[in-house]
Structure formats: structure tokens, C-alpha cells
Image (spheres, rainbow, N blue to C red):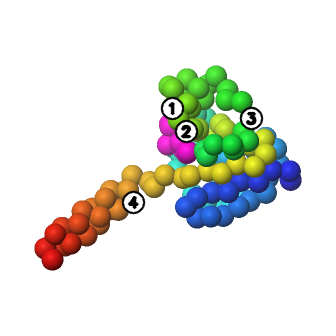
Amino acid sequence: MDSEVTFWPEGKTVKVKRGTTLLDAARRANIPIRTRCGGKAACFMCKVSVRPDSELMPIADIERRKLSGLDDDQFRLSCQARVAGKVVVDIPLDPLRAAVARQLARQAEESDDLW
């Protein structure tokens, strides 16, 4: 084990072998990342944001095509991105949780407006 991956917002760190996918590292850390295609770069559901200075192996053509330019914004498919050293990953909220969070924020704003 010569690499480590830290997942946010959980703040969990896991040590993995070089070449391990971010999806496999997340599973090892017991961090859920949604996927429908079983890690074949077909569904785009496992998209994560990788922080600058993270050490990943170069992006493969299949992942670059699937991301359609989002790789420039530090997005990667966790099923395809392979660890080369120290990596910090931000996992987005799943769509349902994100919708609930937005609704709660709206309700909080509305109640603040009443006072």
C-alpha cells in the first residue's frame, strides 16, 4: 500500500495500492459512490471532484470522452480514475439528498425573512 485517498465530506482516509480505482478505494473505505454500470464508464453516476495536486494516473481515452471536457474542471469518473499517490476526493451529494438540502435551505431563508 503506497497511496492514500481521502474522501470528503466524510473525511475518511484509506491506504490503497497504486493503480486502484477511486471507486474501489471508496468501497474499501465503506464510502458509497453511486454507479449503475458496474464500473464500465457507461453511466456517469460515479463522477467525483478531485482536488488540485491529487496524484492520479493519466486519464484514459474512454474516460476523457465520457467526461466531455469536465476533466479540465477536476471531475473524474471514480470507476476509471486510478490512484498514483496522495489523492483528495470530494463526493457530491446524491440527487435526492441535494434536493432535500436545497429545500431545507429555502425553508430556513423563508423563516429568517419572517423575523
Separation of disc 1 and disc 4 at Cα?
A: 23 Å
Could you classify mark 3 by the number of other residues whose Cα lies within 10 Å: few (under 14), some (14-19), or many (20 or more)?
some
> Residue 6 is drawn in which quadrant?
bottom right
Instruction: Please tell me which residue is depicted at 64% across the width and 22% down the height of the picture.
Output: 61
Return the residue nearer the eye: 57 or 52: 52
> What's the mark number on residue 70?
1
Tell me: residue 46, above or below residue 28: above
Magenta stretch bounds:
43-49
Does the residue at mark 2 contact the one at mark 4 (Cβ under 8 Å)?
Answer: no
Does the residue at mark 1 contact the one at mark 4 (Cβ under 8 Å)?
Answer: no
Closer to the N terminus: mark 3 or mark 1?
3
Closer to the N terminus: mark 1 or mark 4?
1
Instruction: Give the structural element (helix, strand or loop) at label 3.
Output: loop
Instruction: Please tell me which residue is depicted at 23% across the width and 66% down the height of the picture.
Output: 109
Location of mark 3 (residue): 57
Tell me: residue 67, above or below residue 18: above
Is residue 80 among the parts visible in the rendering? yes
Question: How far across and how far down the image is residue 21, in percent?
Answer: 70, 43
Question: How far across and how far down the image is residue 35, in percent?
Answer: 53, 46
> What's the mark number on residue 75?
2
Q: Amino acid at mark 1?
A: Leu
Question: How far across and how far down the image is residue 108, in percent?
Answer: 25, 70
Closer to the N terminus: mark 3 or mark 2?
3
> What's the mark number on residue 97?
4
Q: Amino acid at mark 4?
A: Arg
> Residue 83 is drawn in which quadrant?
top right
